[in-house]
Amino acid sequence: MKRITIPALFISMFIFSCRTTKPSGNYLENYKDTTGKSIVQLPELKIQKGDLLGIQVYSISTEPKVYEIYNLPCAVASSAGTVNTCGYLVDVQGNITHPRLGVIHAAGLTKAELTTEIKKQLTTPKELLTDPTVIVNFLNYKITVLGEVAQPGTLSIPGERVTILEAIGLAGDITEFGKKNDIKIVRESDGMRTVGTIDLTSDKLFESPYFNLAQNDVIMVDPKKQKTKKTEQDVTIARIGFIISLITSASLIYNSFRRN
């Protein structure tokens, strides 16, 4: 009888000592309805080193060679997989190399500013194209979500805008053990790396400079202390179960030998 009661007592004491995980807070706590009052201002993304840019040049000229010499030929697929050669890579000096215009500095500019610079080079001092139109877009817009989310990893964004809430949603939401009020954002801009924090439970969430994400941002969701404690408790329970099984097995073997 004692062999059954003592292990059960140990397990019961340990289980009752475990505390339930505290809720991690709701998104936008205490936020009031601002229908018709909020003005959404979208920040202009700046081009960074390592970005892959799509640049298309058009003109009112009817000469077909215009599109051949001012636009890269695309080879999207190969036997080894998908390959995109339609873009211009911003190198470590922050430049792109255009086949006709040469080296153009791009890092630190917005898409609109780079568009203006390319159009300028197409029309001055010599008009290379008549009434040119230039379209610039990002081909490798991505962010990375790490830590206490359901599906951590790198996310490719098809558009050129994503908010912190959308990114968390794409990663499967924050787990019950993740901190919603202290999320870290690692961002590179103008050759500098910064680490900021954002509180998803705050009613000031939309005012944060990290609400709208930039390309290559890294989001880190730290675990709460409860997870560390729960992990320790799980290990302890496993060890207790192993010890109890050893004691039970030894007791059965001992009683078997005694009967013999």
Image (tube, rainbow, N blue to C red):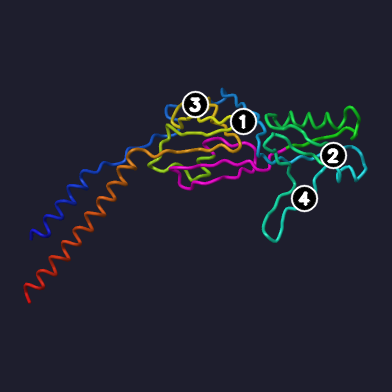
Crowdedness near tag 1: few (<14), some (14–19) or many (≥20) residues, C-alpha within 10 Å:
few
Q: Nearer the viewer, mark 4 or mark 2?
A: 2
Quadrant assignment for the C terminus: bottom left
Alpha carbon distance from label 3 to label 4: 48 Å
Residue 77 spot, x, y in % from top left: 72, 56
Amino acid beneath label 3 = Asp
Residue at 84%, 41% (x, y): give it. 70
Helix, strand or loop for disc 4? loop
Residue 142 spot, x, y in % from top left: 60, 42
Please give the residue where the numbered disc 4 appears in the rendered image.
74
Q: Which mark is residue 33?
A: 3
Alpha carbon distance from label 2 to label 1: 28 Å
Alpha carbon distance from label 1 to label 4: 30 Å
Q: Is residue 225 magenta?
A: no
Q: Earlier in the sequence, mark 3 or mark 1?
A: 3
Please give the residue where the numbered disc 1 appears in the rendered image.
191
Amino acid beneath label 1 = Gly
Highlighted magenta segment, given as a residue range: 137-166
Q: Which mark is residue 100?
A: 2
Q: Are marks 3 and 2 in contact (CB under 8 Å)?
A: no
Residue at 75%, 53% (x, y): give it. 75
Q: Are marks 3 and 4 in contact (CB under 8 Å)?
A: no
Question: Relative to 212, is 70 on the left or the right?
Answer: right
